[in-house]
Amino acid sequence: MKLVAQLEDLLYQAQHTPKKEKLRLADWRILVHESEAVSLGIKDNSPGSVYTPPSYRQGENGEVFLVWSDGKCSQAMVQAGSHDNREYWQQELEQWRQASYVDPDAAHIPFPEPLPLVAVKDKAIHKVIAGDDQMLFDQIARWLTDKPSKAKLQGSIQTAWGRRHVRTSTGLAVTYQQSQFGAWFSFDSLIGGVFAKRRLSQPEEQEELWVRALNLYEAMQLDAPPVGSQTQVILAPSLTEDMLGQFILPNFSGDRVLEGQGAFSKESFLEHKLVFHPHFSLLLDPLRPLELGSYLVTSEGVPADRTVLARNGKLQTPFLRVKDSVRWGAKPTAIPRGTAGLYLKHKTEVSWAEALQDVEDGVLVLTVLGLHTQEVVSGSYSLSAPHSLRILKGQIVGKTDVKLTGNFFADLAAPTTKAAESDLDTYPYLMITTGVQTL
């Protein structure tokens, strides 16, 4: 809270009674995040080693966005320190002014609006941070006890608690608490499970993740027949997320669209062009309780709200930060935290257990190599997928190595593409028809 008070005082004085006229501010925005985190991990079956020691961290950092009286802008990261004297902060203000730039579209601070009610904290996590952390060590012990005997186990658990402060010269003054919990493990760095939300996982959720990973690991120990030209490709939920993050999310950035650097033009959005199959919809939803991508207000002071990016296959809007919204001529939208808060929905989703039974000839692709090197705007991919799992007559029968070639935009537009829901994952299994061959 100390950093917030120091910045508020500094910027208020610079707006109303600056020491130098060139340092007068017209508007400003502050974001400060206080956090505490407890974490521990396992590396190659060793808990608490030099690589993964139990740790407690706390920190306070922030950022400022300034609009000077001449319309120029500045932005800077701010770290908490022992700097209580006004001379230090005055020097910082001078440096921020020297780094100012001209950007009329950015020189806009929204006025406050009502905030939604969103659950973003789990009090049980605060108890862990306060010292009731035995459950973390118990979870690590269970992993080590129950792991496959020959597997090398990697894993990590982290709990975090923090306060988020957003202040603006237009009158917004918001402080709220938020929590975060993440747990992941893997066997031989091939098969694993991940849980990440703003709440602790339930024992049954961890058990279900563990059992699923064990079953896949056992299948990975068997060799399976090679794929054929008619083999159906199934992207695991984590890979669906990665593909969306590589090809879809960047092309829905308002900045890219306005600059003509994305797959879709502004006219395509205004005309609600059909780009995916009508069964698919894409949305940002930061209002879901205790999800990792949920929040009350953006760092720019915009209240959280649902935003439909594509409805029934048709483009609706890109996500617009404040600057983009000024250029677009619309209100700012929800914004993602990476792929957190982004949801892909299909009208005829079935459960994964049901979908698996209907797969006569398929391959489950868990991970691929080199996804980050693929061209974002075209959507085309050529990817190696070692350690995939072969499916025959509704059963996972063993491992195989494959290469995939295709186009992700075409995958989402194809009438043959299906989605299968997983209770353990935010994203679906994506069942596509694309180029596949044995490596």
Image (cartoon, rainbow, N blue to C red):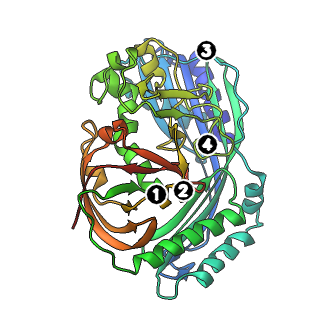
Foreground of the two, 132 or 422: 422
Report the Cα–Cα distance between label 3 and label 4. Answer: 26 Å
Report the Cα–Cα distance between label 2 and label 3. Answer: 65 Å
Q: In this view, does 141 lie above or below 267?
A: below
Say which mark, if any, is on residue 33: 4
Nearer the camera: disc 3 or disc 4:
4
Marks 2 & 1, CB-CB < 8 Å contact: yes
Where is the N terminus found, in terms of image quarters?
A: top right
Q: Which residue type carries mark 3? A: His
Nearer the camera: disc 1 or disc 3:
1
Which of the 4 quarters of the picture holds residue 55?
Answer: bottom right
Q: What element carries label 4?
A: strand
Say which mark, if any, is on residue 16: 3
Closer to the chain start, of discs 2 and 3, is: 3
Foreground of the two, 356 or 369: 356
- Residue 144 visible in the displayed image: yes
Which residue is tagged 2?
354
Marks 3 & 4, CB-CB < 8 Å contact: no
Residue at screen point 44% across, 49% down: 241
Report the Cα–Cα distance between label 2 and label 4. Answer: 44 Å
Report the Cα–Cα distance between label 1 and label 3. Answer: 69 Å
Closer to the chain start, of discs 3 and 4, is: 3
